[in-house]
Image (spheres, rainbow, N blue to C red):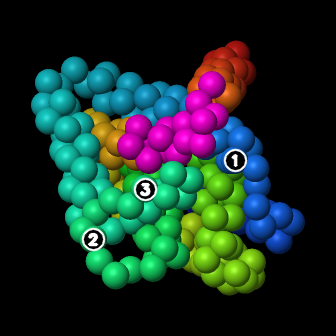
Amino acid sequence: MFVISLALAFLASTLGAALVFLSQALSEKMMSIFYGLAAGIMLFACFYSLLLPALDSGQTGLVLTFLAGVGLLFLIDHLILHESALTHEVEGVTGPRSSPYRLVITMIMHNIPQGLALGIAFQAKETTVPIMLTIGLLMQNLPEGAASAIPLVASIRSPAKVFMIAQLISFLEIPAAVVGYHLAGLARSLLPYLFSFAAGIMLYTIIEEIIPDAWSHHHRPIATLAIFGGLSLMLLIYLFFEKH
């Protein structure tokens, strides 16, 4: 199941990135909707697949590991030069780096934490926990793959090159997931803490990167509805699994 989940997540990113061959520019409104859906989907998956299993242990130390995950991403966010795909806000240590470089770094900063969280979730006792996170990543990778890759076309010009770059970056989810899976397997007694750590990483990415992108270009109302649409869709999927 773990290998299948990794393959499906990579396939979803591939399909999203492949849209660069169909359109070299999506409307700003459509990009905001894509990011809003991705944020809503991952919010549900993060809480259900990471935070709730962690909280079941009742350990107060979970707050510290949660904040450690947030702190790690905060440091990375402010030390590594990167650029938002939609707002084009540049963060991190300044330097003479080109826009494509900054956009690629942003994509990497999204994919590695997601892979790590997926690997950790697969060590959960309840099988629905990794399944829900896998579904979340599948449904999130498709729109995010498109919304992240298409802005690169303006700088790189070649859709084929953009597609290959997006593929290589998406592949990073796989080794990150393998690391998370084996790390959690070696320290099963620390699993709740690893869950909360991964949740902090994921939530920081969603709140700091994905939601601001969704709200950019004066499309905040429709993007907000898309966030709730993503959450509602995951609720329906959860209820389906509960009944079956």
> Given the image, on which type of amino acid does mark 3 rest?
Glu
Alpha carbons under labels 1 and 2: distance apart? 27 Å
On the rendered structure, is 170 left or right of 25? left
Which amino acid, mark 1?
Answer: Glu
Which residue was labeled with disc 1? 28
77, 110: nearer the viewer: 77
Q: Residue furthest right?
A: 22
Q: Counting other residues with Cα less than 10 Å from the Cα at mark 2, is it few (<14), some (14-19), or many (20 or more)?
A: few
Q: Residues within 10 Å of mark 1 (few under 14, many from 20)?
A: some
- Compare residues 201 and 99 and report the one nearer the observer: 99
Circle 3 sits on which residue?
89
Marks 3 and 1, how far apart at CA: 16 Å
Q: Position of residue 35 (x, y in %)?
A: 61, 43
Residue 105 found in image quarter: bottom left
Camera-side residue: 217 or 184? 217
Within the magenta stretch, is there residue 72? Answer: no
Magenta: main secondary structure = helix
Residue toward you, 56 or 64 = 64
